[in-house]
Amino acid sequence: HGLTTALPTALNRGEFFIEYQPLVHLGDGRVHGAEALVRWLHPQHGVLGPDRFIPLAERTGLIVPLGRWVLQEAVRQARAWQEKQDQPGPLRINVNLSPCQLTHPGLVSDTVEILERAGLEPDALCLEVTESALIGADDALLKPLRRLAEMGVDIALDDFGTGYSNLANLRRLPVRVLKLDRSFTQSMQQYPADPVDLKIVEGIVSLAHSLDLAVTVEGVETGAQAEQLRMMGCDTAQGWYYARPGPPERLHELALVDA
Ligand code: G
Ligand code: G
Ligand code: MN
Ligand code: NA
């Protein structure tokens, strides 16, 4: 209850901050980009993770200004990384979008403005939308995502494999990346790994590649998992094996170490 009353003023008070978790190319182990993950430094409760306040922000509508702030801050940070690096190739940034942001009429214009103001190319941005947010999506919902995709922004389907989406439906969505849910990676951790889960991952990778989609795996915690997922054809990976979410300076160091 205390969170409900404090949330609306938290944004103006500057109590939110972003941690970044690297995304790594499985082929060569290099940092490919980072996912922005918002946190709330609550004056009494300390650091709160998104599961503690995102659902509340969605119910109260605060997710729209909060999401816009996250996008602006993450895009600015991505541009700052790019400017510091003397290695070729853009450093890309992934930002999560809530379902309410998808239906908000300002999504496309806000995104364009934020990219332009920061001087970041649209193809350096990837917006993550959960599979469940797009289940049964009609054209009105898909239109802004299509516009963004046409501009060069990548759309990723987050937590993929946990929903019930019709796989054939994927062709209809302006999606470039599937982010395979952590639960698959976790079940591979067990020995022996669940053979059905292995088959499912192989099936998803092969379907994704046949549709020209890249596959990112979440929740990679060991080198053995990374190696197995690489052999299974996954493209990029994210997880504690590489780095936990952390401050932006850390990611810059990780990228330079790998260069
Ligand atoms: O931060 P953590 O690694 O605990 O992330 C938990 C969940 O919170 C993730 O599923 C992520 O998608 C979600 N999340 C993190 N940051 C944001 C954000 O800025 N906006 C939205 N909508 N969700 C976020
Ligand atoms: O958007 P999404 O829910 O996928 O955000 C990633 C979430 O997964 C965050 O809560 C992050 O802290 C968490 N996470 C990231 N890497 C790992 C990992 O290797 N293992 C586990 N258990 N959780 C992870
Ligand atoms: Mn995500
Ligand atoms: Na996810």
Image: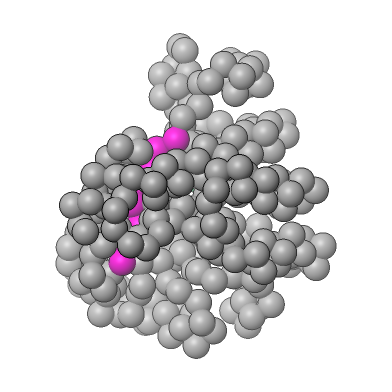
Residue 211 is left or right of residue 249, and the answer is: right
Dividing the picture into quadrants, the one containing residue 239 is bottom left
Residue 24 included in the magenta stretch of the image: yes
Dividing the picture into quadrants, the one containing residue 37 is top left
Picture quarter with the C terminus: bottom left
Image x and y of residue 118, in percent: 55, 43
Residue 256 included in the magenta stretch of the image: no
Picture quarter with the N terminus: top right
At 44% across and 47% down in the image, what residue appears? 78
Image x and y of residue 83, in percent: 39, 47
- List the single residue furthest toward the bottom: 210
At 29% across and 53% down in the image, what residue appears? 86
Residue 178 is left or right of residue 217, and the answer is: right
Image x and y of residue 71, in percent: 57, 43
At 60% across and 23% down in the image, what residue appears? 11
Image x and y of residue 16, in percent: 50, 27
Is the residue 25 above or below the residue 83 in the image?
A: below
> From where the camera sits, is residue 63 visible?
no
Range of magenta residues: 18-25
Is the residue 174 above or below the residue 141 in the image?
A: below
> From where the camera sits, is residue 139 visible?
yes
**238 vs 147, nearest the viewer:** 147
Helix, strand or loop: magenta stretch: strand
At 17% across and 63% down in the image, what residue appears? 223
